[in-house]
Each structure stands twice: as structure tokens, then as C-alpha cells.
Image: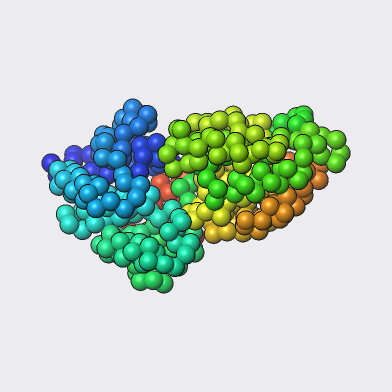
């Protein structure tokens, strides 16, 4: 096998789940296949395997990725990537999520494989400067040293990696998140009647601001000053469906005494968006650009988020939504009350402005063009936004 075929190049996408590759990268995978490239996907097996194959990709089931540091498990996944790269000889490996970025990056250096990781955010490891942070910096340096490009989703992440010497300024590129399919996520008319619905959708972890959302709901209550009913809907996977999230019992305890209610997981948030008047993501997690917020903007929903790297980029304050202080339920409550005070015309105008912001900044076409260029060994700008 060689990295060239009669149609194009052999490209490999690697992530921590096949669900991630299908949910966040399917448009790019499909576009590269349409260009004639031979696309392979590597991730632990899950229920999106067949969907990736239906796109036209060849799927490789990687071993489970270790959730904690484990020399044996780490060596196993590194050896698996090395073996895969030697068998496939891909022209370029695109990786996403931390562990594939590190292990596939080291494997790419050992095998001389082209490599372009995507840093979707800093995550929890960079919240403090400690021994774990130092170890992470060394691991990223070892992995990214030979990368063609290292793609970041916000300026803070890029500047930190460049500032610590993990990557050079010439290696670093910046794209606005994973992008959103503006055709699939089209404007949805606001609900015509009560209740007024605030929607939270995302990974159910505390650092996404779930406690602040529940507390703001408690304070505001389920009836607005003008007598409208209010609902606070939470959509996402619990630990029973996705291991990196909180258990259902913990979520239930968090929501005790709050009108906020859990509505289960969803594979297509557009149905939930059609019921909502506003999308709320009070995150203080180490985000890249949160996909849930840009999907909401594309659906013409006002967005309330926090003044936090990656989150603040999704909102133009007072025009497309409101920005609250991270970890501050009172600030979040105030932002939500501002939304409740808008009449229908003003709310619709804010939603339309949110859609325009998504069109200007977050169209997935920009991501597709960048990855298509890298797949064909064309350079992309060191900073795309």
C-alpha cells in the first residue's frame, strides 16, 4: 500500500470516538472523499461505525483510549497507531481530541507520517500550572514537533502553545471551531406561544456551567414578570451513555429544587432548538469554539454564554445574545432576564443577527477548505481568523 492512489491521497482521521468523527467532522470527511481522496477513520468502536462507512470512509477500530495515565495502556495505543501508519502509509493524519493528538503525533514522528492535529481547547489539564501541566506540555511537544500544522480553535489556546514553545508560530493555524453546516442547521422560526424556553445542550459536566444554569433557574422561577411560563431544558448524555459525563443521579441531585429539567440525550438538537427561544451555555471549560453554541446561532437563536476563551467568540454582546461572567450564577441570571425582557420583534431580530454571525464566522466551508488544502500539501495561513 502507498499513500497515493489513482484518485487522490490516503488520508486518516483519528479521534477518541467514532461518534466524534461522525458528529463533528462528517462534512469534511465527505468533502475529501468527493475530491477523490481515500479516507480512513480510526477511533474506538461505537454506534457511528456504520454511519462513517456510509460516508465512504474505511473504519479502523482502535483499542480503548486510557482515561487515566497507564503505562501499559499508553504503550498499547501508541503501538497500535505505529502499526496502522506503517500498514496504511497515509499521506496525512488529521487528529482531534487530546489523546489521539498525543499518541498519533508521536507515532507519526516514529513512522515519518504527515501529521496535522486539531487542538479543540485546553481542557482541564491547563486550568492550573502544576506537575500535570508540565507533563502535558512535554507530551504535546513530543507529539507536535514534526506536525505540518497545528490547528487551534481560538487565539488563547494558540498563543499559549506558541508562548510555551510547544509549537512554532509558523506551525500554528487558527480556524473558528469545527464549523457548522449552514444548510443542515438552517434558521428555525421562534415558537409562537408559551412557554419561554431556555435550552442548555452539551456535555453534562459541571464545567459547562450546569450548576450556574440550575441556580439561575431557581432564582428566576417558572413564571416571568409579565406572566409567561418559563421552561429550562437540559439536553445531553449522562454517564450511562457517555463515560466522560456525570451520572444521572448526580445530575438529579444538582437539579433538586430547580425548575430546570433534564430532557434526555439527542442525536439531532434541531428538534430541541425548534422549541427554544434562547440557547444558554455558561461554560468555564477549556473550550475551543463550542459547537453547540454555533449550531444554535445557525438556527437563529440568541445565545447566552460566558466571557471565557472560545465561548465569547460565539456572541456579539447585546446584538446576538449576552455574555455572563464565568462561574457566576447571578451574572447568568441577569443575562437571562435581559432576554426575557425582549419583545417578540426584538427577540427575532437578535436571532437573525445570531444567524448572520454564524454565516460570517462559522461556516463549515472554511474548515473543509483548510483540510482539503492540507490533504493536498498546500499550506494554510498561520492564522485563519
Above or below residue 280? Residue 154 is: below
Residue at 28% x, 51% y is 70
Q: Position of residue 263 (x, y in %)?
A: 60, 30
Specify whether 359 is left or right of 39. Answer: right
Q: Position of residue 338 (x, y in %)?
A: 77, 49
Between residue 11 and residue 312, name the one nearer to us. Answer: 312
Residue 291 in view, yes or no? yes
Residue at 41% x, 67% y is 130
Q: Quadrant of the N terminus?
A: top left
Q: Quadrant of residue 116?
A: bottom left
Residue 85 in view, yes or no? no
Q: Position of residue 79 (x, y in %)?
A: 18, 48
Residue at 77% x, 36% y is 222
Specify whether 19 is left or right of 272. Answer: left
Specify whether 326 is left or right of 39. Answer: right
Please identify the residue farthest to the right as the structure is shown: 226
Please identify the residue farthest to the left as the structure is shown: 1
Between residue 44 and residue 252, name the one nearer to us. Answer: 252
Residue at 53% x, 41% y is 204
Between residue 76 and residue 348, name the one nearer to us. Answer: 76
Q: Position of residue 195 (x, y in %)?
A: 75, 31
What's the colour scheme?
rainbow
Above or below residue 140? Residue 231 is: above
Q: How many marks?
A: 0
Amino acid at each position: 500500500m502507498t499513500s497515493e492512489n489513482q484518485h487522490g491521497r490516503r488520508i486518516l482521521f483519528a479521534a477518541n470516538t467514532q461518534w466524534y468523527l461522525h458528529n463533528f467532522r462528517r462534512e469534511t470527511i465527505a468533502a475529501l472523499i468527493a475530491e477523490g481522496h481515500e479516507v480512513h477513520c480510526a477511533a474506538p468502536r461505537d454506534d457511528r461505525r456504520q454511519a462513517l462507512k456510509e460516508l465512504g470512509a474505511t473504519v479502523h477500530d482502535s483499542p480503548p483510549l486510557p482515561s487515566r495515565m497507564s503505562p501499559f495502556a499508553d504503550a498499547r495505543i501508541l503501538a497500535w497507531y505505529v502499526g496502522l501508519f506503517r500498514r496504511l502509509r497515509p499521506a496525512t493524519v488529521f487528529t482531534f481530541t487530546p489523546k489521539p493528538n498525543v499518541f498519533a503525533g508521536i507515532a507519526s514522528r516514529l513512522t515519518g507520517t504527515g501529521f496535522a492535529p486539531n487542538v479543540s481547547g485546553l481542557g482541564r489539564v491547563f486550568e492550573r500550572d502544576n506537575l500535570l501541566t508540565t507533563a502535558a506540555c512535554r507530551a504535546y511537544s513530543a507529539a507536535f514537533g514534526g506536525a505540518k500544522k497545528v490547528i487551534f480553535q481560538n487565539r488563547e489556546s494558540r498563543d499559549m502553545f506558541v508562548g510555551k514553545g510547544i509549537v512554532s508560530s509558523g506551525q500554528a493555524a487558527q480556524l473558528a471551531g469545527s464549523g457548522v453546516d449552514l444548510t443542515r442547521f438552517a434558521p428555525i422560526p421562534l415558537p409562537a406561544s408559551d412557554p419561554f424556553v431556555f435550552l442548555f445542550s452539551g456535555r453534562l459536566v459541571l464545567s459547562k456551567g450546569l450548576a450556574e444554569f440550575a441556580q439561575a433557574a431557581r432564582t428566576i422561577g417558572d413564571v416571568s414578570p409579565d406572566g409567561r411560563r418559563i421552561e429550562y431544558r437540559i439536553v445531553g448524555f449522562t454517564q450511562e451513555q457517555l463515560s466522560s459525563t456525570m451520572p444521572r443521579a448526580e445530575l438529579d441531585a444538582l437539579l433538586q429544587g430547580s425548575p430546570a429539567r433534564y430532557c434526555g440525550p439527542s442525536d439531532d438538537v434541531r428538534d430541541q432548538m425548534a422549541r427554544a427561544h434562547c440557547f444558554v451555555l455558561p461554560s468555564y471549560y477549556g473550550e475551543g469554539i463550542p459547537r453547540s453554541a454555533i449550531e444554535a446561532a445557525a438556527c437563529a437563536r440568541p445565545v447566552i454564554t460566558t466571557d471565557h476563551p472560545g465561548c465569547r467568540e460565539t456572541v456579539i454582546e447585546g446584538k446576538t445574545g449576552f455574555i455572563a461572567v464565568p462561574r457566576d450564577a447571578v451574572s447568568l441570571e441577569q443575562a437571562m432576564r435581559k432576554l426575557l425582557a425582549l419583545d417578540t420583534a426584538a427577540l427575532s431580530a437578535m436571532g437573525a443577527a445570531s444567524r448572520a454571525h454564524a454565516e460570517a464566522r462559522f461556516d463549515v466551508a472554511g474548515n473543509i477548505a483548510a483540510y482539503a488544502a492540507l490533504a493536498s500539501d498546500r499550506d494554510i495561513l498561520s492564522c485563519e481568523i
